[in-house]
């Protein structure tokens, strides 16, 4: 399947949808991460929160599969932005990262000021992120409505693709598209 997906992109440049605004956030190790730190690398982003009882678990499992599918030494990073910065502080994100076997040199979990995260997630990545009204919450951890998409960004921080994180073929699709960008 990966060969088929890779063949779809061969010779065809991926579109450019938007450019991400500058940001300064904190990763699971308490280190500052900026957009400038990611320049020169291809990266795959998503939005999650560690208390999520549903889709985030699948998204993170798929991100782990993407991490494992990418060739070592490629300039490709994975970045998960939290939608729950009040709870998802670096120690919580570190434990979550360990749960999914995230390699520090490959996969960052970012938190920070809620407005800064909103700017990246909604204004920059063009993903929906909403606090779920208490009257609509089905459980104590049913806190946010957010996208189930993976976003592919190029070395300049430009959005080059959106991929359905619930699709069973998403790992092959994203890995193939990322490989296409390494050849640009």
Image: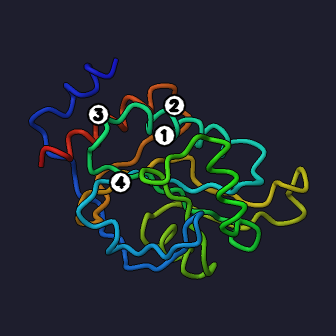
Report the Cα–Cα distance between label 3 and label 2: 15 Å
Q: Residue at x 51, y 53 (%)?
A: 46
**Which of the image's four quarters has the N terminus?**
top left
Q: Residue at label 1?
A: 164
Crowdedness near tag 4: few (<14), some (14–19) or many (≥20) residues, C-alpha within 10 Å: many
Query: In the rendered view, how is the structure colored?
Result: rainbow
The answer to whether 159 is drawn above or below residue 11 in the figure is below
Which circle's residue, 3 or 1, is located before the other in the chain?
A: 1
> Which residue is tagged 3?
176
Q: Residue at x 68, y 71 (%)?
A: 85
Mark 2–mark 1 Cα distance, whole angstroms, equals 5 Å
On the image, the x and y values in percent for residue 125 come to 43, 64
Residue at 59% in and 43% down = 60
The answer to which of 70 and 174 lies nearer the viewer is: 70
Indicate the secondary structure of the residue bearing disc 4: strand
Q: Secondary structure at mark 1?
A: strand
- Label 1 packing within 10 angstroms: few (<14), some (14-19), many (20+): some
Query: What is the spatial separation of the Cα atoms under label 4 and label 2, in whole angstroms?
Result: 19 Å
Direction left: furthest residue: 11
Q: Is residue 31 above or below residue 52?
A: below
Number of the label disc, if any, that sits on residue 167 = 2
Q: Secondary structure at mark 2?
A: loop
Q: Left or right of 162: which side holds 73?
A: left
Mark 2, Cα crowd under 10 Å, few <14 / some 14-19 / many 20+, is few
User: Percent position (x, y) of residue 110?
Assistant: 55, 66
Per the model, the C-alpha gap separating discs 1 and 4 is: 16 Å
From the image, tell me which residue sits under label 4: 43
How far apart are the alpha carbons under marks 3 and 1? 14 Å
In depth, the one of 181 and 101 nearer the eye is 101
Q: Could you tell me how far apart the alpha carbons at marks 4 and 3 are, in whole angstroms?
A: 13 Å
């Amino acid at each position: 399947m990966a060969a088929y997906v890779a063949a779809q992109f061969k010779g065809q440049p991926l579109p450019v949808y938007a450019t991400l605004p500058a940001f300064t956030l904190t990763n699971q190790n308490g280190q500052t991460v900026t957009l400038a730190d990611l320049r020169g690398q291809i990266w795959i982003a998503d939005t999650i929160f560690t208390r999520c009882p549903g889709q985030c678990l699948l998204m993170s499992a798929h991100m782990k599969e993407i991490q494992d599918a990418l060739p070592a030494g490629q300039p490709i990073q994975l970045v998960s932005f939290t939608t729950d910065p009040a709870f998802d502080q670096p120690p919580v994100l570190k434990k979550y990262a360990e749960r999914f076997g995230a390699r520090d040199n490959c996969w960052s979990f970012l938190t920070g000021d809620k407005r800064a995260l909103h700017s990246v997630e909604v204004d920059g990545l063009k993903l929906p992120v909403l606090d779920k009204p208490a009257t609509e919450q089905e459980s104590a951890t049913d806190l946010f409505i957010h996208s189930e998409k993976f976003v592919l960004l190029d070395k300049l921080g430009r959005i080059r693709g959106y991929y359905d994180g619930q699709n069973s073929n998403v790992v092959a699709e994203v890995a193939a598209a990322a490989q296409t960008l390494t050849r640009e």
